[in-house]
Amino acid sequence: MAELLLLGTGAALTADGSREPTMFALRGHRSTILIDCGSNPIRQLQRMQVPLDSIERLILTHSHPDHISGFGLLVEMLWLHCRPYCRALPVHGPADAIDVARRLFAQWDSSTWKGLPELEWNEIPLEIGAPIATGSDFELAAAPGIHSVPVIGIRARDLHRGGVVVFGADGEPSPGVRALAQGADWLVHEATGVFPGHSTAEAAAELARAAGARRLVLVHLADNLADLDAQRRAAEQVFGGEVWLGRDLDCYKF
């Protein structure tokens, strides 16, 4: 059975140190997919005992620092831990996110890093149902969201058992994410609060209900700004089912 791993569940303005920036992994029988790298996903994967040589690709949802600034460290640590067996690392994302990641990594002279994994850059069009890749364990597709920069949501289908997880990324509830979430087993949606380009817990619950998603997990949370449990209860009233508050290092099977 595939697993959704919550490597980080915090918003950029989380102030109490309890949450890493929002980032995830999908773990299948043979591979691991990383989604975003705002801090150090490698340490979180190690805490969850995920083999680093199982990482198949990285998907960047958008270019904001709390989702992309750990990119250089991610590549360096993969190189240090997996050499001399480093394979190429496909990196997928909107053109804006790819451009930022490329410029970030170009700051370092890696010419002497023998065995550095080749970075394969793959731009994802901002279209509903845009294919990302089909790998060892997952079929991956994207759709545009609504945020202050170009952003994508992601739909992952387990090729072995058919389970579906959708990650809405940062943003307001959007037609694109709603399309991805149709009939999903798990919808992982942000609930930062009443801020431009973000979503409340109730709005995330309404999208999940309208899409017929079976379960809802709230992420991109700021404990210091709101009563999260009260928000969860309010979301349950809208959704009509159980709603989870995501926590760092949580694991959900699908």
Image: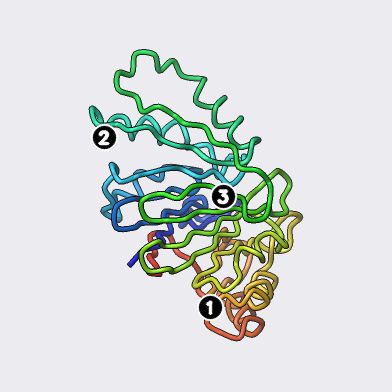
The answer to whether residue 94 is visible is yes
Q: CA distance from mark 2 to mark 1?
A: 38 Å
User: Of callouts 2 and 1, which one flags the residue occurring earlier in the amino acid sequence?
Assistant: 2
The answer to whether residue 14 is visible is no
Q: Secondary structure at mark 3?
A: strand
- Circle 2: is it few (<14), some (14-19), or many (20+) Cα within 10 Å? few
Disc 3 target residue: 131
Q: Give residue 83's quadrant in the image.
A: top left
User: Of callouts 3 and 1, which one flags the residue occurring earlier in the amino acid sequence?
Assistant: 3
- Circle 3: is it few (<14), some (14-19), or many (20+) Cα within 10 Å? some
Q: Identity of the amino acid at label 2?
A: His
Front position among marks 3 and 1: 3
Q: Secondary structure at mark 2?
A: helix
Q: Nearer the viewer, residue 130 or 110?
A: 130
Disc 2 target residue: 81
Left or right of residue 200: residue 83:
left
Query: Which residue sits at x=50%, y=70%?
Result: 186
x, y percent for residue 247: 45, 64
Q: Is residue 222 above or below residue 121?
A: below
x, y percent for residue 217: 52, 69
Query: Which residue sits at x=54%, y=63%?
Result: 166
Q: Residue furthest right?
A: 196
Q: Identity of the amino acid at label 3?
A: Pro
Numbered circle sitting on residue 147: none
Q: Secondary structure at mark 1?
A: loop
Q: Is residue 143 above or below residue 232?
A: above
Left or right of residue 123: residue 198:
right
User: Of callouts 3 and 2, which one flags the residue occurring earlier in the amino acid sequence?
Assistant: 2
Q: Give residue 76's quadrant in the image.
A: top left
Disc 1 target residue: 214
The quadrant in which the N terminus is found is: bottom left
Q: CA distance from mark 3 to mark 1?
A: 23 Å
